Image (spheres, rainbow, N blue to C red):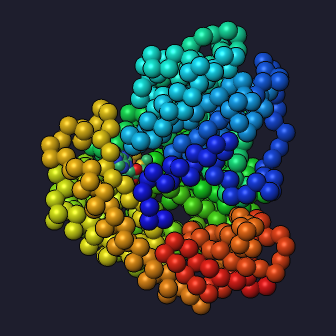
Amino acid sequence: MNKAFDIAIESLASPGATAPAPSTSTSSPAASPHPRHPNAAPGKSFYLETFGCQMNVHDSEKVSGVLLGRGYRAVESPAEADLVLYNTCSIREKAAQKVFARLGDWKTTSQNKIIGVLGCVAQQEGEEIFERAPWVSLVCGSASYRRLPDLVAELESGGRRVTGLDLDTEETFETEITRRDNPFRAYLTIIEGCDYSCAYCVVPLTRGPERSRPSGSILSEVRRLAAAGYTEIQLLGQTVNSYRDPSAPKLNFVDLLYAVAAVPGIRRVRFTTSHPNDFTREIVQAIDSTPALCDHIHLPVQSGSTPILRAMRRTYTREEYLEKIAWIRAARRPISLTTDIIIGFPGETEIDFAGSLSLLDALQCDGVFSFKYSPRPNTPARDMPDAIPEEEKSRRLAILQEHQRLIQIARNDLLVGSQFEVLVDARHAGRDQWAGRTTSNRVVNFTSPRVNLLGEYVQVRIARAGPNCLVGEHLV
Ligand code: SAM
Ligand code: SF4
């Protein structure tokens, strides 16, 4: 996992894919006929490419559901589609540039097609997208997705340019149908937007203020997913643990975790991303006492230096973050920890950087997503003095990644000989291996004498370990 953000985005952006589905060789347990909307558009097709985080991947599943409900059919290549949509990410500059490169492909060939931009770049650039790419007809940010059916209907009835760019909404994006691309793990957004204001981050500007989804609606969806055969649920939010139930039961995040884990048929519950400020002892106690709550916490720290954390407006110090890690490490059940770190924030000195390296030693994470700081439009950090040159950021990132790689090698070596339950989600035909994840979210590749294991929970003994995965054999 110790890799730069570019790679994560690449892996989500493969042509023809709307999500990193673990395998295309099985059908979704939730695959169900899609009821048609009364004003459906029979015969029309759409292609949707997704960039960015899991929230975007899941938003795309919901957008696909909306379109399927209107009678559209999904196709594998943009050339075949009547409607071509890009669900975009603008967390880093390169990610945003890539979207304009994709749009450029349609400059002379967009006749008879509707081209649309969804997500963070849509929200950030707004109607300027029409200036830069006049062949685009739809621009819609994620806070306006509830208007998508109307926007699509407007285009179908001849509208030339439609936009959904409001941010002042209390609503979350709920759909009658969600086309789920991962057959084993169901994503479920419980909170949208973000009320923090980290100095480097576009999310509050592109996804709007925090809105939690009512607990009753979340729990009914979990029950429906369990009935459809899903056993693993991943609760999503930019700050998932800031969840506050807007409806009468007034569940807090921990109450919701217990309630989701108690739904019959659900064996694994994950949640991401947690914000350190809202991370409580009760979350650790819930994981400690409830086997269905996965023993993995992703808790982005961003820097190991308190002055840099202050400049980033992260609302906690290095010491306060470490105090929360001590709760996790004191749990009876070993809990795997992963984090995010930004390198080269303006003003980051060698001492600050050394603080991030020493924090990695103290944390002993099983994975770190590390990013070079990327200045973003309309964020306070963009105008901060003492920008770090690009080459220096690259140098520090390489040092940090190597530092963390050695930590992961040492940690994973300790697991050789141990046994894990693995939910099998892929097969590597060329290597004659199966792949899956442990409840602690470790990737395990393994051999088995069995012929079809997809979707099964199996016991695997670990024989070898690398920095990013474990290798073992199925205990039949
Ligand atoms: N809400 C989560 C939190 O506060 O920890 C993070 C969500 S953000 C979409 C994912 C990660 O992108 C962040 O944890 C941060 O490390 C990284 N990121 C955000 N803005 C960035 C920027 N301008 N440059 C580089 N990395 C950035
Ligand atoms: Fe961005 Fe900070 Fe909100 Fe996370 S908490 S989404 S980093 S503003």
Residue placed at 58% from the left, 33% from the top? 86
Query: Where is residue 151 drawn, in percent x and y?
Result: 62, 19
Which of 399/41 is in front? 399
Q: Is residue 284 above or below residue 135?
A: below
Please give left or right for residue 306 compared with residue 126 in the image. left
Q: Nearer the viewer, residue 443 or 17?
A: 17
Residue 81 place in picture, x, y as percent: 72, 28
Q: Nearer the viewer, residue 98 or 371?
A: 98
Q: Quadrant of residue 262?
A: bottom right
Q: Would you place residue 254 above or below residue 312 in this image?
A: below
Residue 230 position (above or below residue 245): below
User: Can the viewer see residue 228 in this picture?
Assistant: no
Asked if one can make out residue 99 in the rendered structure from this viewpoint, the answer is yes
Quadrant location of the C terminus in the rendered image: bottom right
The image quarter containing residue 475 is: bottom right
Q: Residue furthest bottom?
A: 417
Residue 416 as seen in the image, left or right of residue 182? left
State the image coordinates of residue 419 (x, y, percent, origin top left). Answer: 63, 85
Does residue 88 appear to the left or right of 420 in the view shown?
Answer: left
**Residue appearing at x 45%, y 80% in the figure:** 409
Q: Is residue 437 above or below residue 5?
A: below
Q: Residue at x 48, y 75 (%)?
A: 467
| Residue ID at (71%, 72%) | 431
Q: Position of residue 218 (x, y in %)?
A: 63, 47
Number of callouts in the render?
Answer: 0
Please name whichever residue, 123 or 332, is drawn nearer the observer in this view of the structure: 123
